[in-house]
Amino acid sequence: MLKNIFYPTPQNAFVWLSSIYLLFLLYLGKATPITILFVYFLETIVIGIFNALKMFCSITFTKSGGYALILFFLFHYGFFVAIQSIFAFAIFSIEGSTPIKEPFNILENYSIILNLEDIKYALPAIVFTHLGKFISDFINNKKYLKFTASEIMFKPYIRIFIQQFVVIITFFFIVFSNAGIIAAILLIFFRLLIDLCLEAIKENSKTLDFLSEKLANDKASKEEVKKQLIIFTE
């Protein structure tokens, strides 16, 4: 089971490459621990953009639903991200050593993060990961024919909630201790672990069969559990 999750494959190659690249940036001093943290924080927006693209593909090729559903997703996802951002920016501004000062200036704070000197080296790793997965997995496997836009629409929320929680916890280790590099490395490894687990839960995989067998009950059959797990890990 562990081999199915952690062993490098074409399916999880983008996850491995992204993590190795970020570790390499830390080693070279081309990215600071706080920049690594901000990059994972920005990933929430990247996830939303690619989720909207998946919805667009699904609507275009299956003719199910309308494009207005994408606008609805962008509106409520954007609102959700804005609330999370205010909460995170408030925490980031507590210690005073980060460039974030006023939590309610959402656009200004994102602009500050995007203009950090070393963000240009680190952010492409996250974009590259999601772009690679979008093309190699979602497009090449024609998953836009398997899921409706409404099914895809709600899938990012649990994932980004977990992600933001991990980022905020790591922030305290980076800012309030002398172990910033170690905390950043642990963040990269922990995110690698999460992403590899999610990548392992794919159609026709042994991990998917194992989990669906364990989670199936009287209210949800094994096949129903499988579909929900696949949607969640898209």
Image (cartoon, grey):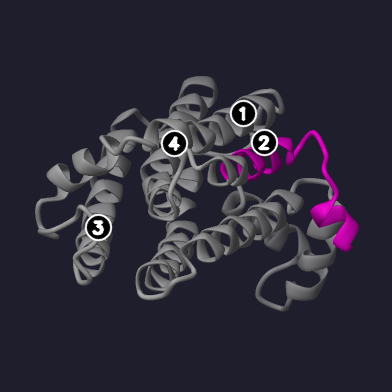
- Pointer 2 residue: 14
Q: Earlier in the sequence, mark 2 or mark 1?
A: 2
Q: CA distance from mark 4 to mark 2?
A: 14 Å
Classify mark 1: helix, strand or loop. Answer: helix
Mark 4 is surrounded, within 10 Å at the Cα level, by few (under 14), some (14 to 19) or many (20 or more) other residues, namely: many
Q: Residue at x 57, y 43 (%)?
A: 22
Q: CA distance from mark 4 to mark 3?
A: 18 Å
Q: CA distance from mark 1 to mark 3?
A: 31 Å
Task: Confirm or deny contact between disc 4 and disc 3 (CB under 8 A).
Answer: no
Which of the two discs, 1 and 4, sits closer to the camera?
Answer: 4
- Pointer 1 residue: 132
Image spot of residue 178 (x, y percent): 44, 71
Which of the two discs, 2 and 3, sits closer to the camera?
Answer: 3
Task: Give, as a three-letter code, the residue at label 1.
Answer: Gly
Task: Confirm or deny contact between disc 4 and disc 2 (CB under 8 A).
Answer: no
- Pointer 4 residue: 123
- Which quadrant is the C terminus positioned in? top right
Q: CA distance from mark 2 to mark 1?
A: 6 Å
Mark 1 is surrounded, within 10 Å at the Cα level, by few (under 14), some (14 to 19) or many (20 or more) other residues, namely: some
Q: Which quadrant holds residue 95?
A: bottom left
Image spot of residue 102 (x, y percent): 10, 59
